[in-house]
Amino acid sequence: MQTFNKIGAVFALTAFFAVGCSSVTKTVSDTAHSLTTMHTKKVVDVNEVTASGIGKKIGTISFQDSDKGLIITPALADLPSGTRGFHIHENASCAPAEKDGKPGAALAAGSHYNPNQAPHHGTPTTGHLGDLPALVVDNTGVATTAVIAPRLKFADIQGRAIMIHAGGDNYSDSPLPLGGGGARIACGVIK
């Protein structure tokens, strides 16, 4: 009888943990599914850019609408390590253009996407609509960490460009304008 009680207790504990684990797995799975339910992923090629033109492809960035905003997932290599300014720009071009009589990398992309005329650069929730969370590049020059732009949908950014800047982003216009991102080093046209 005692053996049957032990077997029954082991069976009950196993069933309890199996149900508990499957419910946690189901919750995580449901959350991930709800972020991407019925939304197609769009992929954009990203190239190095210089004042001379568009260079080699360094990877892709995918865009997917979700209930929380636009999920932006980089798959990039050959970037300088550290935090980089990351923005949607108003024009669908990565070509160089002139500013103050000098050619500049990807200047044809224009300024940050700002249809609401926000007066200042800011965070992804307060500034220009094109202000994204900073891009994190690891020590090997690879960026794969997804960010969410809570106020954007893919339809908002079609026909624009995604830009990676040489500097970081302090989400302010001080001490340097536009978060201190500086030069444009990589760009992709969002079709």
Image: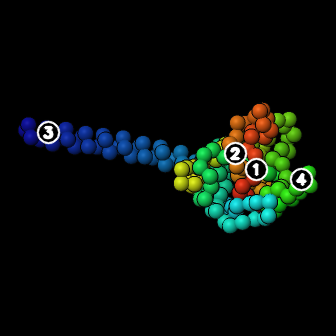
Under mark 2, the amino acid is: Gly
Residue at the (9%, 40%) spot, across then down: 3
Q: Are marks 3 and 4 in contact (CB under 8 Å)?
A: no
Instruction: Say whether residue 163 is left or right of residue 16.
Output: right
Nearest to the eye among marks 3 and 1: give it: 1
Q: Eyeballing the image, is 42 above or below 137?
A: below
Nearest to the eye among marks 2 and 3: give it: 2
- Label 3 or label 4, whichever comes before in sequence order: 3
> Circle 2 sits in a helix, a strand or a loop, which is it?
loop
Marks 3 and 4 sit apart, C-alpha to C-alpha, by: 80 Å
- Label 2 or label 3, whichever comes before in sequence order: 3
- Residue 6 circle label: 3
Picture coordinates of residue 187 (x, y %)? 73, 58
- Label 2 or label 1, whichever comes before in sequence order: 2
Residue 152 in view here: no
Picture coordinates of residue 26 (x, y %)? 45, 47
179 and 154: which is toward the camera: 179
Q: Which residue is mark 1?
A: 183
Residue at the (13%, 38%) spot, across then down: 5
Marks 2 and 1 sit apart, C-alpha to C-alpha, by: 7 Å
Marks 2 and 3 sit apart, C-alpha to C-alpha, by: 64 Å
Under mark 3, the amino acid is: Lys
Q: Residues within 10 Å of mark 1 (few under 14, many from 20)?
A: some
Q: Eyeballing the image, is 57 above or below 70?
A: below
Marks 3 and 1 sit apart, C-alpha to C-alpha, by: 69 Å
> Circle 3 sits in a helix, a strand or a loop, which is it?
helix
- Label 2 or label 4, whichever comes before in sequence order: 4
- Residue 99 circle label: 4
